[in-house]
Image: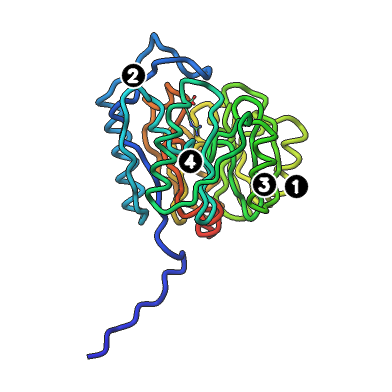
Amino acid sequence: MATPTMPPDPRGPRPRLLMCPPDHFGIEYEINPWMDVTQGSDAAIARRQWQALREAVVALGAEVELLEPAAGLPDLVFTANAGLVFRGLFLPSRFRFGVRQGESPLFERWAREHGFEVVPLPEGMYFEGAGDALFCGETLFAGYRFRSDVRGHQWVGERLGVSVLPLELVDPRFYHLDTCFCPIAPDAAIYYPGAFDEYGRSVIRDQVPRLAEVSAEEAASFSCNAVVVGRTVVLNRGAPKLAATLGAMGFDTRPLEFSEFIKSGGSAKCLTLRLDGEEAAAWKSSP
Ligand code: ARG
């Protein structure tokens, strides 16, 4: 009997995300304005919120790979900062702060064991991976100042042969690009204008035809830090205006609670690293 043939999935192969269970997550130092060691965090709530994100992306069709958590590295859970994935290459982060530098060997080992070619940046450059470098279409938008530096981004652009648009981040609360800019299609992104200077805003407006602008209030609830799977944007609760804007642009939204991770300055997107390539992430989600 002939086997029936399936039509190819128009979105291409399943999206793959790297996540790290929050077993050792906590607020143990302060390296951004959201962190307050006296506030602490609740391990059980963090676990529930992380698990809900994992279940949501799996239900949307993504495949989740897990990195083993490690004691003494409370921010390892933020896999967006592992590095930048581009096709089969993995460019590991060079963290600005010593407290996060111990994560790099673990991320690098994971990448090597999973078939990526690891391409280290030269010494003396700072680069915080997909936290600060995001493809929208074929262009790499690159945030700098608080964490990554411009030289790191330039080196990455040359090594990958892609065009890089450096954007200066001006508000310390939005210290990584993924806290204020989120590509959702090759021609579309979510962004919070207040995190950029006038020049950065004009670059974004010139380069990205469809923009979902976020208010100061909704940006402060980390709504730009979203994960896109297919046509669904998974983001922190508390951004009804953005949800309406995204709806009008043809996207569904899936609000979840990320309060424990926001205490550390991270939300949905920070907890994931797209492994099938950030450039593919934007491309495949195009409505
Ligand atoms: N506490 C972490 C830090 O300050 C949060 C990282 C959030 N990650 C991100 N991709 N924005 O480094």
Mark 1 vs 4, N-terminal side: 1
Q: Residue at x 26, y 89 (%)?
A: 2
Name which residue type carries label 4. Answer: Ala
Q: Horizontal placement of 193 versus 234: left or right? A: right
Left or right: 13 in relation to 139: left
The residue singled out by tag 3 in the image is 157
Which of disc 4 and disc 2 is earlier in sequence? Answer: 2
Q: Secondary structure at mark 2?
A: loop
Q: Nearer the viewer, residue 76 or 286?
A: 76
Most extreme residue toward the front is: 123
Amino acid of disc 3? Gly
Which of 275 and 5 lies nearest the eye of the viewer?
275
- In the visual, does 26 lie left or right of 210? left
- Residue of label 1: 206
Residue located 51% across and 59% down the image: 284
Q: How many marks?
A: 4
Distance between mark 1 and mark 4 Cα atoms = 22 Å
